[in-house]
Amino acid sequence: MNILFVEPAFPKNQREFVRALHSIGVRVTGIGESPSGALDDELKHWLHRYEQVRSVTDEGALLDAVRRCQSREWVDRLECTVEAHILPVARVREACNIPGTSVRTAFLCRDKPAMKDALRAAGVPCAASTGAESADDARRFAEEIGYPLILKPRAAAGAAGTYKVNNREELESAIRDCQLDRGNPTAVEEFVEGHEGFYDTLTIDGVVQHDFISHYYPNVLEAMRTRWISPQIVVTNRMNAPDYGELKALGQKVITALGIGTSATHMEWFFGPKGLRFSEIGCRPPGVRVWDIYSRINDFDLYREWASAVCFGRIEKQPSRARAGGMIALRPELDGRISGYDGMDRVQDRCGEHVIDCHLPPPGTPTQPVGSGYMGNAWVRMMHPDYDGVRAAMNFVGENLKVRASPQ
C-alpha cells in the first residue's frame, strides 16, 4: 500500500504519523516544504520517497507533486493532520481521484459559520452565529442577538485571533482588530456561558472507534489572555460516567451530519446554563501533542491506531483507560528571557511518580507571549490512576513551580 503524507517534518510530532504508517508496513511518500537533506536519518528511514514543494498549501504545487507520485506508482491514500492543510489536501485528493475526506466535509470543518449552519439544520445545538463580510454585518448581528459576542477568523484554530466583546465599544475595537472593516470575513457568534472541553475521536466510515474526553481549566479564551493563570488540559478516564453519554451522542451526530468518514476529529464543546452546546470541530487530531497523552495513559499507540484505520479500515487495540492525564502550562512572570525556576524540587518530591515529561527551557531562552499557547513556554505532562488525583497533582505544580524571567 502506498500512502502520501503531507508535511512529515513540521511540526515536530508530524513524524509520529510517518513512524506509525511505516510500522504497519505501508510505503510512505512524504510531501513537505523542507529540503530532503534537512530530514534526519530516522525520518528518512521511515519514508519510501520524499517530494519537496514550495508550500503544502499551494494547491497547484501540491497537485503537481501528487501527480508525479501517481505517475510512478499507484497511490492509495493522501493524508494530512494539520488544520491549515485539510482543505487544500482535500481539493487535490478529489482532483486526483484518491479516496478520503471530501472537499465538502473539509470546508464545513474549516469554515465556522458554514459548519454551524449545517449542524443547526441537523438539529445539533449550537450558538447563534453568522459569517460577517462587513462591519455592518457584525453590527446588525449584535443588535439582533445582543452581547456578549465572540469574533474570530472564519477558519481559525484554537483561540487564535479570537475576541470576546461585551458592548458596542468593544465590538468596534474587535472589528478593527479582525480587519472586518477592511472586508476580512469574520465569524461572529453568540457567547456561550459554561465549562469548556473537547471530545476527540478516531472514526472509520463515519463510526466512532476510539474516543477521548478532555476538560479545560479555565476555558481557553481566559487561559490565553491571563498571565498569572497556569492553564490545564485534563483527560478523563471515566468514559462510562452517565453524564458523558449525551456528549458522545452529540459527537456522533456531528460526525454524521458533516460526512466525516475515516479520520481523526477534534470537537470543542461547552456545558452551562443552556445545557450542552457544540462549539466547533476539526477533521484532524488535536493540537499540543494531546495524542501523546492519550497513548501513554491508555497503554497503546494511538498514532498506529490511526494508521491502521486510514490504511486498513480497522483498529488494533482498545485503550486501557487505566489512568487520567493532562498537561499544565507554566508562564514566565514577565516577557524577556527565562532566568530560572523555583519549586522543581518540591514538585519532584511530591509528584515525581506522576510526571510523564516536562519542558523547562534553559535560562537565557527568550520567553513567548502568553497567547502563544499551552506549549509556548514551560509545561509539565502528568498522569494518575484517578481523575481527581491528576488534577490535584497539576494544581500542586501550578502553585509551586514558578518560571522566573528577566527583562531583555
Image: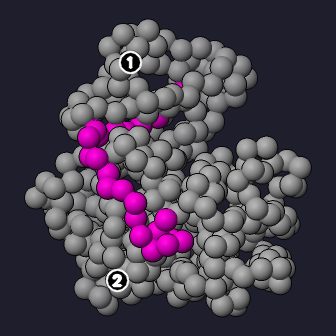
* Vertical arrangement, residue 365 with respect to residue 274, above or below: above
Mark 2 surroundings: few (<14), some (14-19) or many (≥20) residues within 10 A: some
* Vertical arrangement, residue 48 with respect to residue 106, above or below: above
Circle 2: residue type: Thr
Q: x and y percent of residue 4 in the render? A: 69, 70
Q: Quadrant of the C terminus?
A: top right
Among the 4 quarters of the image, the one containing residue 392: top left
Residue 268 magenta: no
Pointers 2 and 1 in contact (CB under 8 A)? no
Instruction: Give the residue displayed 38% in from the left and 18% down from the top.
Output: 352
Looking at the picture, tell me which residue is in the foreground, 197 or 143: 197
In the shown orientation, is residue 152 left or right of residue 293? right
* Vertical arrangement, residue 372 with respect to residue 99, above or below: above
Q: Can residue 153 be seen?
A: no
Tell me which numbered mark, 2 or 1, is placed earlier along the sequence.
Answer: 2
Q: x and y percent of residue 384 in the render? A: 28, 32
Instruction: Give the residue displayed 69% in from the left and 65% down from the top.
Output: 27
Q: Can residue 206 be seen?
A: yes
Q: Which residue is mark 2?
A: 256
Q: Which residue is mark 1?
A: 352
Residue 316 magenta: yes
Instruction: Give the residue displayed 68% in from the left and 73% down from the top.
Output: 2
Q: x and y percent of residue 22 in the render? A: 63, 57
Mark 1 surroundings: few (<14), some (14-19) or many (≥20) residues within 10 A: some
Circle 1: residue type: Gly
Instruction: Give the residue displayed 79% in from the left and 44% down from the top.
Output: 40
